[in-house]
Amino acid sequence: MNGEEIEPKVVMVEVFENQRWWAGAGWTSTMLGEERSSWSDDSGLAKLHEKSADSIPPLANHIWVDDDWVLDTEWAATDSEGWVFT
């Protein structure tokens, strides 16, 4: 690209774990077919893999800056373990 270096930028990847309550089984990641998948993006439309740097490869031409995942309890009203109930 004309010998110019491309300025690196950090992109945040958000992964949401979704569960539902089943009578007799309690909270589980077994979802109904029309519901979001057990792991998704914030919209619930993109089916994602479980949250680990080993199971989610970086996007093309990207690298992971940090292998540690952080539970975000500030984006919405969560309980002490980061769960939001709807």
Image (cartoon, grey):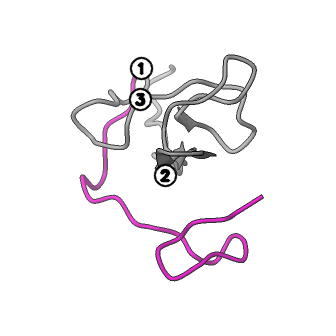
User: The residue tagged with tag 3: helix, strand or loop?
Assistant: loop
Name the amino acid type tagged 2: Val
Query: Could you give the CA–CA distance between mark 1 and mark 3, rounded to whole angstroms?
Result: 17 Å
Task: Please provide the residue range marked out in magenta.
Answer: 60-86
Q: Is residue 48 above or below residue 43?
A: above
Which one is in front in this view, the residue at disc 2 or the one at disc 3? 3
Q: Which of the two residues, 36 or 57, is positioned nearer the viewer here?
A: 36
Of mark 2 and mark 3, the one earlier in the sequence is 2
Q: Quadrant of residue 32?
A: top right
Outermost bottom residue: 80
**Residue 70 sits inside the magenta stretch:** yes
Query: Could you give the CA–CA distance between mark 1 and mark 2, rounded to whole angstroms?
Result: 14 Å
Neighbours of disc 3 within 10 Å: few (<14), some (14-19), many (20+): some
In the displayed structure image, the side of residue 71 where residue 19 appears, left or right: right
**Secondary structure, magenta segment, majority class:** loop
Evaluate if marks 2 and 3 touch, with contact meaning CB atoms under 8 Å apart. Answer: no
Which one is in front in this view, the residue at disc 1 or the one at disc 3? 3
User: The residue tagged with tag 2: helix, strand or loop?
Assistant: loop
In the displayed structure image, the side of residue 19 where residue 86 appears, left or right: right
Q: Residue at x 59, y 45 (%)?
A: 23
Neighbours of disc 1 within 10 Å: few (<14), some (14-19), many (20+): few
| Image spot of residue 66 (x, y percent) | 28, 56
Residue with the mark numbered 2: 10
Residue with the mark numbered 1: 60
| Image spot of residue 57 (x, y percent) | 32, 27
Q: Residue at x 51, y 21 (%)?
A: 2
| Image spot of residue 55 (x, y percent) | 28, 30
Evaluate if marks 1 and 2 touch, with contact meaning CB atoms under 8 Å apart. Answer: no
Q: Quadrant of residue 83?
A: bottom right
